[in-house]
Amino acid sequence: MIIILMLLAMLHTGLATIAGYEKLENNFLKKLGLSQRPVVEKDLEIPSATMELYNSMSNATSTHIPIPGLHTTSANTAKTYYNKGSPINSKSKRYRLQFDIDSIPEKEQFKAAEVRFSMLYDNVTQNEEFIHVVIQDIIQPGIKGVSKPVLRIIDSKSINMSKVSKSESFDVTPFIERLLKNKFKDNNGLLVQCIKFSGSQINLLNVFDFMSPEKALLLVYTDDGTSEKSSLEQMMQRSKRSVAQLGGSQKKTKKKICQRYSMYVDFKEVGFSDWIKAPPGYEAFYCHGKCSFPLASHINASNHAVMQTLMHTFNPSLVPLTCCVPTKQSSQTLLYLDTDGKLVVKNYPDMSVDECGCR
């Protein structure tokens, strides 16, 4: 009987631990704006354009997305959409891009959008020094033999084919703005056309890689309202890893003082690595230590903390000691899959501790 009771107690403890973990996971997902844990395909391939965007955001001095030429302003989120257009053959002079975007979350404010194409180079295109690429919004599809499509040019660019570039970007912000007004009811896609300076058209497969869905992407930039600018000083503070902060060779007496300690979050270890694709983990740090009287100047204590510590020395039973807490934090960029299976690059504020103090 005693053994059975012990087993039941162990089972209850295990279930409570599982329930506690699930609660923590749900809270974390909620913080990321996800309603449930994403389901991930095993053979998922991350497009190079999405990874390049993640790298640029990770190295930025702000939580905002730095995209030259685009008015991303306060955007802190970028979502990737794959091209679902019709099959293309080697004789195609025009190509219809189709992206399965049907909404933008109500809490997010749309800022900008672009399409990125992977470039191809062969003898045909290299002999043409320049080509002109036109992107058109299909306002209304045409009916064969009855009417022509209603099109609107939203971006164009002259490309020097003698200079190799991995990809080309086109601003399609007006396309998404039109869809937003109509609640995405008239998403007829975009039309791509390449024209020589002589006026004749070029086969698209000689210029762009439209055969693979991940080679033609729509990137939509939004602001969820949580972004705050981080100064260059804050970002530099984050990169500092002094011995005193990490607690590597500190004296035992100093370990008791309020300070910052290393805390590496490994996403594989906590079970998030299947849907968080980058980074594999990050240094979050934590604050720990006493806020004893007298408070040292480097502890970064507030005026209130100084007075509370002073009062504690006179009446410890009535006034508690101040707490060692983060006083400055910085953002962390994550590349992950959302519940719709879309790749998202996002900057989240207050993910890493830069400084600790008594409060």
Image: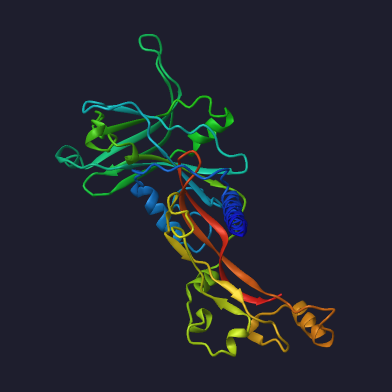
Whole-percent x, y for residue 267 in the image = 46, 58
The single residue placed furthest to the top in the displayed view is 146
The single residue placed furthest to the front in the displayed view is 1
- At 39% from the left and 49% from the top, the residue drawn is 50
Residue 230 can be seen in this image: no
Quadrant housing the C terminus: bottom right
Whole-percent x, y for residue 252 in the image = 56, 89
- Front-most of 358 and 349? 358
Q: Which quadrant of the structure image shows residue 86? A: top left
Whole-percent x, y for residue 231 in the image = 55, 67
- Front-most of 100 and 31? 31
Q: Which quadrant of the structure image shows residue 280? A: bottom left
Q: Is residue 118 left or right of residue 106?
A: left
Q: How is the image coloured?
A: rainbow
- At 39% from the left and 41% from the top, the residue drawn is 41
Whole-percent x, y for residue 35 in the image = 58, 43
Q: Does residue 179 lie above or below 234 as drawn?
A: above
- Front-most of 133 and 120? 120
Q: Does residue 232 lie above or below 79 as drawn?
A: below
The single residue placed furthest to the left in the displayed view is 123
Quadrant housing the N terminus: bottom right
- At 17% from the left and 41% from the top, the residue drawn is 122
Q: Does residue 206 lie above or below 259 as drawn?
A: above
Residue 241 can be seen in this image: yes
Instruction: Report the number of discs.
Output: 0
